[in-house]
Amino acid sequence: MTSSSRMRRMAVTIGACALAFGFLPGVSGVAVAVVPAATDCAPDSSDARVKAGGHAVERNELTAAQVAAREKEAANRLAARRKLAGVAGPYAGVLAVNVPVVVHVIMKDTTRAGGNIPDSMINAQIDVMNQGFGGQTGGAATGFSFTLSKITRTVESRWYDMARRSAERSAKTALHEGGYNTLNFYVSGLGQNLLGYATFPGGDLAMDGVVVLNESLPGGTAANYNEGDTGTHEVGHWLGLYHTFQGGCTGNGDFVSDTAAEASPAYQCPVGRDTCTGGAVDPIHNFMDYTYDSCMYEFTSGQASRMVSQWTAFRAA
């Protein structure tokens, strides 16, 4: 999908983990609490997007305890950054980041049906992410942009369904490149109605990255989910955002004050949905809900601020 067509479309639709200790990447000699690697604490290693009628596999569902552990670690890391910078108040860190992207195409064979998507779909995916994170489709400009630095192509049928843990670990161990500030974007076939999943900041570097269904890229065959917003959604997780429905109607929810509380995922594109009394209508147009690609188009200013703080805590050099 071209930038102009995307803009036209948007105009129309307008389990708990113990903490270990490690060293903050890029901050020499500062020990902070670190959530264990995915092998030690699998359930909080990632979050997902699923099709209507589907359900996230258990390892993609975060409990309140796991969220609390992640938030504690982020606070500890930001405090360490603040101390090194000599800043008395909140430490925002960088405000504009261009993220290098390495795309790994996993195939059963070299045919399109076997997962061999063309470069044009990959380039269109990067464009969609830049539009969404840049605020060009609506909502806030987040300060994050993305540059495609490399495409790898691997024929390995055993890795094709990366929803399987063994396939994920084998593929990522072999293919992952760069540090925490490089986005490894894996494109493969996925089962269980799963559209994609992503690791949150701060886990096992070898497992770090985003995995999306190949046919969810712009121009793919995943009806209602083929405009590239799965990629945008999963990169939101990679930058530290939770789902808009995280935590339901009580507590801290998604830890963003300007996204209305939401009791459960929204699917398709419901009108006037309001699942939590006493607040605004559900944020069905937010990239971090589960609605159709044609329905989601925005991040909020609060989400932009959270992504900056999460980048500063976990991914900044």
Image (cartoon, grey):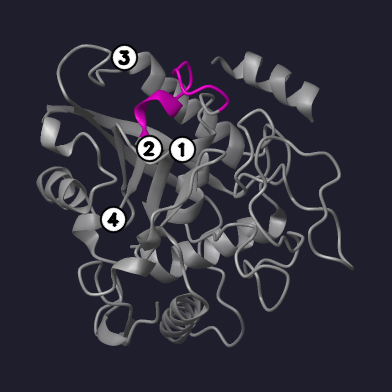
Residue 212: image tag: 2
As measured in the structure, the alpha-carbon distance from the residue carrying label 4 to the one carrying label 3 is 24 Å
Q: Does the rendering let one see residue 43? A: yes
The residue that appears at 37% across and 23% down in the rendered structure is 122
- Label 2 sits on a secondary structure element that is strand
Marks 4 and 3 in Cβ contact (< 8 Å): no
Where in the figure is residue 131, as x and y percent of width and height?
Answer: 59, 32
**Which quarter of the rendered picture does the N terminus lie within?**
top right
Tell me the residue that label 1 is attached to.
231
**Could you classify mark 3 by the number of other residues whose Cα lies within 10 Å: few (under 14), some (14-19), or many (20 or more)?**
few
Numbered label attached to residue 50: none
Tell me the distance, in whole angstroms, between the alpha carbons under discs 1 and 3: 16 Å
Q: Which of the two discs, 2 and 1, sits closer to the camera?
A: 2
User: Which residue is under mark 3?
Assistant: 118
Magenta segment: does it hold 148? no
**Amino acid tagged 4:** Asp
Q: Residue furthest top?
A: 111
Q: Give the range drawn in magenta.
A: 213-224
Between 110 and 95, the one nearer to me in the picture: 110
Of 309 and 28, the residue lying toward us: 309
Real-space Cα distance between discs 2 and 1? 6 Å
Main secondary-structure element of the magenta-colored stretch: loop
Tag 4 residue: 208
Q: Please state the horizontal and vertical placement of residue 95, each as a whole percent of the image.
A: 56, 57
The structure residue drawn at horizontal position 77% and vertical position 39%, both measured from the top left corner, is 270
First in sequence: mark 2 or mark 3? 3
